[in-house]
Amino acid sequence: MPNPAPRERAANAIRADILEGRFGPGEFLPGQRELARRCGVAFNTLGEALKELEAEGLIEVIPRRGSRVLRPASSVTVRWRTDGHVLPAGANALGAGTDRKVERRHATEEVAGALHGEAGMTVQLRRSVLEHDGAPWALRDLYFPAFVVDEARVLASPEYVDEEQALAEHGFGETGQLSHWSARPATAEEAQALKSGGSPVHVVRRISYCEDRPVCCELMTIRADRVLLSRKSGNVPSSP
């Protein structure tokens, strides 16, 4: 196998020190020059490695103070309900999320197929990052075909919107849904948004139908290293 690049080598070494407890939560790492010397890389290369670890959520870089180790993100139990929705245990709604993005774009082949359209069709994307205990656990993408947004214009608003309510109020109330669960490696964009360090993700695709027309394709990309999946049926006592 090829040798890792200097940045990757430095990031791997510091990551191992953190995960093996040599630097605990709340502690500051040695200064960048000292870390660069220990890792055998240039000062600028060490800075790139620290940025990678910060994107993973392992450290925070504080200007003029140094790099502090963050406590590990706690696990979260979620339930995949019979209606296809994924919610944290005990929750009735996902809430607004953070880092919201609302934009028109061309659909991927997967999304276009789910919406019974052609690759490249125009869709409205509503994206948010879902957090638990201050750290992200899922990336939620909602895709709406143009004919839906032409009627329910609120779906193009950058503000928080209850999308299901908006659909119902504009004549696109859900009459059925189709969902499935899969797993795959995270993309670089997903790993950055989820601060997951590239760990695998689960993906729940949920298609909402109004009569025979798909009106929304939801992609929930979930950190596999944080999330415990739970399902229940029948008379089961409540649990945390």
Image (spheres, rainbow, N blue to C red):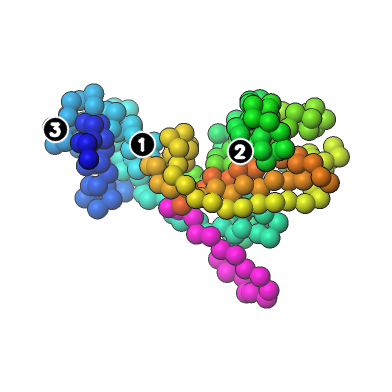
- The residue indicated by pointer 2 is 110
> Label 3 to label 2, Cα distance in Å?
44 Å
- The residue indicated by pointer 3 is 40
Say which amino acid is labelled 1.
Answer: Glu
Query: What residue sits 68% from the left and 31% below the top?
Result: 118
Magenta-drawn segment: 225-240
Q: Quick one: label 1 or label 3, which is nearer the N terminus? A: 3
Q: Quick one: label 1 or label 2, which is nearer the N terminus? A: 1
> Label 1 to label 3, Cα distance in Å?
20 Å
- The residue indicated by pointer 1 is 54
In the rendered image, the vertical position of residue 211 relative to residue 42, given as above or below = below
Is residue 226 covered in magenta?
A: yes
> Which of the two residues, 136 or 81, is positioned nearer the viewer here?
81
Q: Residues within 10 Å of mark 3 (few under 14, many from 20)?
A: some
Q: Residue furthest right?
A: 171
Residue 31 seen in render: no
- Along the horizontal axis of the image, is 135 left or right of 143? left
> Which of the two residues, 204 or 132, is positioned nearer the viewer here?
204
Tell me if label 3 and label 2 are in contact, CB under 8 Å.
no
Q: Position of residue 93 (x, y in %)?
A: 67, 51
Q: Position of residue 64 (x, y in %)?
A: 29, 27
> Label 1 to label 2, Cα distance in Å?
31 Å
Say which amino acid is labelled 3.
Answer: Gly
Q: Residues within 10 Å of mark 2 (few under 14, many from 20)?
A: some
Quadrant where the N terminus sits is top left
